[in-house]
Image: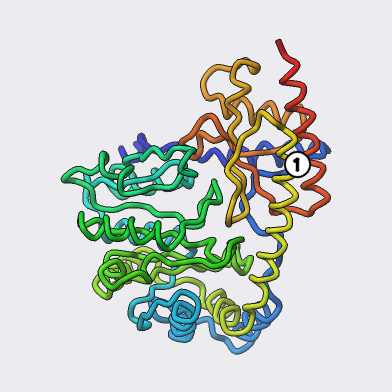
Amino acid sequence: MLSNRLQAITPSFTINISAKVSEMKEQGKDVIDFSIGEPDFNVPQLAKTAAIEALDLDKTKYDKICGLSELRLAITKKLMDENNLFYEIENIVVSNGAKHAISNTLMALINPEDEVLVPKPYWVSYPEMIKLTGGVPVFVETPNRNQYKITPQLLSPYLTSKTKMIFLTNPSNPSGIVYSSEELLQIGEFCVKNNIYILADEIYERIYFNDSFTSIASLGQDIKDKTITINGFSKSFAMTGLRIGYSASNIEIAKAISVIQGHLASHPSTISQWAATAALNHCNHEPAIMRKTYKKRRDLAVSMLNAMEELKYVTPQGAFYIFIDISAFKKKLGYSGSFSVAFSNSLLENALVASVPGIAFGMDDFIRISYTCSEKHLLEGLNRMHTFVRSLQMTK
């Protein structure tokens, strides 16, 4: 009785992990959870105050489908000041989180059988979102020697007459890599030349550990016209449950996104939007504090991972994840089906450390861990991982 489109959809690995972790914690087991991709900070106080004031002032009625004018104005100012991107508020559509903004974009641009290039490793929901909107995900292999980054040379073999869009996640979930402006310019020019839309998922753009971050849409008008920039408040302001994201695009695409959103969801919660407006206008020191904290944790984590010689990884330059190559243990761990699922399950059951299997990101020889936890828990979890790895090394 269910629709045919569901037959091609893979259930979320992360939801299964979360359910298992919750069950084990209810049993009283001391699980260190490295699987969650959620900041361990709280919503900034001024943003919470703005939400409370909005409720007290009864700002709870329907508003513009594309989002509050005040919030869209704050977004345009943010994009100009931080990303060197000039947009009018008509180019901005506020949605129920970045995931909703991505879905809107796909619905606005993808026809049945259109192909969307998805570099590996990819965020878990990209392929399923593409399938749900009628498109065909085409997975692009990215070698370790290139830090899992795409280049025009890597993309060229995947082009067909049906190629419509590419996903560009910068900084990356799960690898934490960050593209330089030179690398982005080459990709942007390639996409313009081949008439490919760029879905630039920049949800982690305030969590970078190098000198600066570059938005690909800032690298030229032609590139900007082909780019839909996706961002939100979940990662930079720890507003995960408030569900506010947005897209910035050319006016034709923005209007299409707004029409789609109007029929499917109307607008996001006005109360959440007032909180987001206050966050952009008054709370910009909080992301800097978060970034400094994550960098310190990143440095601690990689120093400990270096002691686990058979685990390989690319040092993350942003976000708050490490994508770890576990392939050295393939012959040490008995399994059927997915190797990374078996490894993650064994790590959870034997060491009480939760991770996300790499198959969720399209690469089965990996796991992803997150350092959105206290240093105490980070140290404890990585020590448990080290003990677990040593036990596998001793296996015949």
In which quadrant is the C terminus drawn? top right
Q: How many callouts does the rendering have?
A: 1
Q: Quadrant of residue 243?
A: bottom right
The residue drawn where x is 36% and y is 48% is 151
Specify the quadrant that holds the N terminus: top left
Residue 169, given in percent of the width and then of the height, sits at 45, 54
Q: Position of residue 120 (x, y in %)?
A: 43, 41
Foreground residue, 216 or 240?
216
Tell whether 125 sits left or right of 42. Answer: left
Residue appearing at x 77%, y 21% in the figure: 391
User: How far across and how far down the image is residue 52, in percent?
Assistant: 66, 81
The single residue placed furthest to the left in the displayed view is: 161
The residue furthest bottom is: 57
Position of 298 relative to 79 (above/below): above
Task: Let me know if residue 247 appears in the view.
Answer: yes
Tell me the residue at 56%/51% (across/down): 176
> In the rendered image, which residue does mark 1 sit on?
304
Q: Secondary structure at mark 1?
A: helix
Amino acid under disc 1: Met
* Front residue of this view, candidates 381 and 175: 175
Left or right, 150 with respect to 282, comes to left
Left or right placement of residue 395 versus residue 144 in this view: right
Q: Residues within 10 Å of mark 1 (few under 14, many from 20)?
A: some
Q: Against 197, is 233 above or below? A: below
Tell me where residue 387 appears, x and y as whole percent. 79, 29
Write the residue at 71% across / 52% down. 299
